[in-house]
Structure formats: structure tokens, C-alpha cells
Image: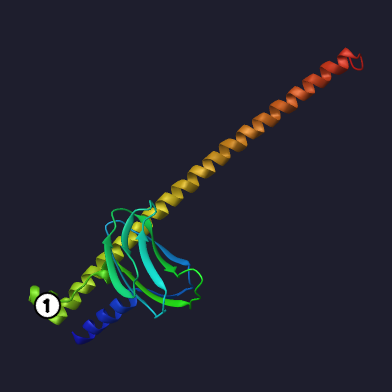
Amino acid sequence: MYACCSFCLFFIFLTISVDSLMLQLPPNSRRCLKEEIEKKVLVTGEYELSDAPGQKTDIIVTDSKGQVLFSRENIDKGKFAFNTDELDVFEVCFVTKMPAGQGGMTREASLSLKHGVEAKSYEGLEEVGKLKPLEIELQKLEDMSEAIVKDFAYMRQREEEMRDTNESTNTRVLYFSIFSMCCLLSLATWQVWYLRRFFKAKKLIE
């Protein structure tokens, strides 16, 4: 039983992926991170910036339509969270501002993004649901399994869409090739007929 639980935890740690990275933010610059996320998914983010005297930094989270999902000015560290309504590409941007005529130093920003199961908080679930630690881990494993099944279903859907697109493209190319061949044959026939008529008019052939 203990070995099975250990394997489950190991599997969870291997499967969960956290996008954590460092960004260099020069004065008066804009640095962005884009990521495509599925619909109806919880997304959480945590950021922390190094000290930079006199320099202000804003964070803006938007979707591909330009809708602002989260925005804060003059940040140092903090968190944000939102739910996706549809499959979209989301953008997290840091904008640094420095007063004119003043030099500034490059600021470092640490950004950690989580979505799906990894963004779900299990803190307090033990007390609220009166669950044992092993039951909590099993709940995590169940949620992770559901997420993996959804990911495979999404990948299968994308593969089917890509296959349909390829088949449609091949059909169009085939029809275009047939049309081109018909045009070339028609043009060659017309050229032969025109030249034969021209030579007959010049009495070069009978």
C-alpha cells in the first residue's frame, strides 16, 4: 500500500509541469510571455521582482482579443488567477517605466504560471472534507488522471482537425492540378488548330 502511494506521488510530481522563468526587464521596456490554454481551465500566476530604485513596473494579463484579465501598477510581488472561457492565447506582460533623464538598472522578474490541476489548491481540503492525507493524494491522482484524459482527447481532436485539413488541401490540390491540365490541353489544341488554319491561309500546307 505504501509503495503504491509512493508511486502515485512520484507519478504526480512527474506529470505536473510548472512554467517558472526569469525575465530581464530593462528600463522603459515591455516583456511578454504568451501561452495557449484550453477553455474552462483555472490559471494562476505568481510573480516577484527584484529591487530597482526609481523604476516602476506594471503587469498586464490579456487574451488575444485584447481583453484585460488582470492588471496591477507599480508591483513588487503578487499573485493573480482567472478562468478561461475558451481556447485562447493569453499574454502576460511586464511594462517598466523610468522618469525621463534618469538612468536605471535592469530588473529581474520571476514568473510562475500554473493551470489546470496544478493550479488547484488542496490546502484546507483535509479539514473541510475530513479527508485523510492518503485520500488527499488519491484525490490529486484522480484529478490528474482526468486532466490527462482531457489532454489526450484534446490532442486527438486537434489531430483529427489537422488530418481533415490535410485531406481537404490534398483534394483541392488534385482538383487544381486536373483543372491546370485541362487548361494546358485546351491551349495546346487551340494552338494546333490556329497554326493549321494560319498555314492553310498562307497556302503552306493543304
148 relative position to 182: left or right? left
Between residue 13 and residue 108, name the one nearer to us: 108
Which residue is the extreme one toward the bottom?
2
182 relative position to 115: left or right? right
Q: Residue at x 14, y 77 (%)?
A: 135
Q: Position of residue 15 (x, y in %)?
A: 33, 74
From this view, report whether residue 106 is shown above or below residue 157. Answer: below
Q: Residue at x 45, y 51 (%)?
A: 162
Q: Residue at x 77, y 24 (%)?
A: 191
Q: Residue at x 61, y 34 (%)?
A: 178
Q: Quadrant of the C terminus?
A: top right
Q: Kindly identify the amino acid type of the residue bearing the numbered disc 1.
A: Glu
Quarter of the figure with residue 34: bottom left
From this view, report whether residue 51 is shown above or below residue 174. Answer: below
Between residue 161 and residue 42, name the one nearer to us: 42
Q: Quadrant of the N terminus?
A: bottom left
189 relative position to 51: left or right? right
From this view, report whether residue 41 is shown above or below residue 203. Answer: below
User: Dot 1, how many residues are within 10 Å of its Cα: few (below 14), some (14-19), or many (20+)?
Assistant: few
Q: Position of residue 20 (x, y in %)?
A: 38, 75
Element type at marker 1? helix
Q: Which residue is mark 1?
A: 126
